[in-house]
Amino acid sequence: MRLSQYFLPILKENPREAEIVSHRLMLRAGMIRQQAAGSFSWLPLGKRVLDKICNIIREEQNRAGALEILMPTIQSADLWIESGRYNDYGAEMLRIEDRHERAMLFGPTNEEMVTDIFRAYVKSYKDLPLNLYHIQWKFRDEVRPRFGVMRSREFLMKDAYSFDLDYEGARAAYNRMFVAYLRTFTRMGLQAIPMRADTGPIGGDLSHEFIILADTGESQVFCHSDFLALPIPDAATDFGDDDAIAGIVKRWTTPYAATDEMHDEAAWQDVPDAKRLSARGIEVGHIFHFGDKYSKPLGASVTGPDGKEHDVSMGSYGIGPSRLIAAIIEASHDENGIVWPESVAPFDVALINMKPGDADCDRVCAEIETVLTASGKDVLHDDTDQRAGAKFATADLIGLPWQVVVGPRGIAAGEVELKNRKSGARETIAIADIAKRFGGGA
Ligand code: ATP
Ligand code: MG
């Protein structure tokens, strides 16, 4: 992609409204534009990151056996009246009336709607387990939208819903999502710690919030430092093996970890002093078992092996892709800008032409762009006539993992400069070796 043909509205000044670094950098790097309180457009660079995040989430949901669907954003109030939540949900729900004066709402979540889909089709335990998810915009009229996409009113959510015959089955479904979440966040370069969360009137121990440690986090959290060294389940993990999956969950729920609301001072005192991590945290995911809370009022039941009707046992599993982008930036930036982990970077390589208009520079840049693109790399080719300093500043700000700098003197020697954004390390490499260096052919 040539920068001269791209839309990258970089801001030179620090936007005054941005209180935290991720919000500031997302605005400065031209990733998002605020449209109203807590509502943002995603500009090309931001949209690329959002897509990468969603693809990782999707791959891991699919691997764990969940099936992707897509439900509408606007819902009819009827199902919510049936479940009893229409009045309970409160002011966070945006209520709308259509031209026929029918009560509608902009979905803050989808338990009712997915349960309605389930009850229409599934009648026997033989069709279970079932886990349906979608990645869809939600609206919550937050009291205090702030920190950009970290806490917005319209935001993207991956929400999955599991259906099982009984508690045992629901627990296994919960465990699969738990393990899928460990893999998902790790693939984005994040260290997420599952922390016991409040189960409210449902009770039990099946609710965890996945928390990223960061100074700007909204919650106070407490955990054992052993979490930082626990092994992440690999891609060969067998999601069909309930015992193996339960073993991983056991391991990841044994050291102490709790948010403010669930903090247990006595258990905390048992953690050795040197192992205590008391920090701020960002919630990026939340998984929850709620049994028959929706299946009972909505009549979602199946015939069991005993020939009787059973209200299905359900759970829901959320991840916030838009909030995750802010969380990744909070965890990975420096004084010059964003430092993207390779897996979510909007482009892999910033190719910087130091002297556009110079025939050799233009030719070598075009060749490198072709070669890298052919080896599967996404290249942002800065062919603009900005000053060199401004080009370097932009490349650092938008945080692509690699910078390839092409100038007349290097070309004369058959070389270009390669800079790693994260380490800052620079090296000179032969133009002929570029493809090999990035995993392509000779
Ligand atoms: P919070 O306590 O931060 O308000 P929540 O408990 O309301 O979160 P859930 O209902 O569990 O969140 O939603 C699932 C996920 O959606 C959260 O873990 C978070 O990543 C994301 N999310 C929730 N609210 C917002 C928001 N206002 N802006 C951006 N992402 C959000
Ligand atoms: Mg909330």
Image (cartoon, rainbow, N blue to C red):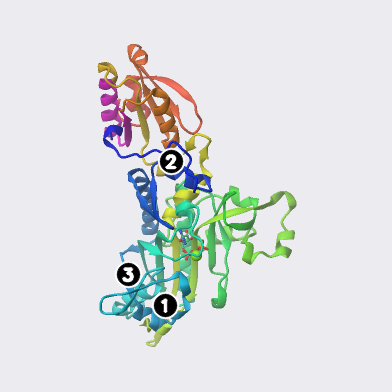
Residue matched to label 1 = 165
The residue shown at (57%, 49%) is 214
Q: Is residue 148 above or below residue 260?
A: above
Q: Which residues are magenta?
A: 362-383
Q: Secondary structure at mark 2?
A: helix
Can residue 201 be seen by looking at this rendering? yes
The residue shown at (48%, 37%) is 337
Q: Which mark is residue 233?
A: none
Query: In the image, what residue type sits under mark 1?
Result: Leu
Residue matched to label 3 = 74
Q: Which mark is residue 28?
A: 2
| 363 in magenta | yes
Q: Is residue 129 above or below residue 406?
A: below
Name the quarter where the C terminus is drawn.
top left
The residue shown at (28%, 32%) is 4
Query: In the image, what residue type sits under mark 3?
Result: Ile
Percent position of residue 316, x then y: 44, 68
Q: Secondary structure at mark 1?
A: loop
Q: Earlier in the sequence, mark 3 or mark 2?
A: 2
Q: Residues within 10 Å of mark 3 (few under 14, many from 20)?
A: some
**Residue lying furthest bottom in this view?**
308
Q: Secondary structure at mark 3?
A: strand
Q: Nearer the viewer, mark 1 or mark 2?
A: 2
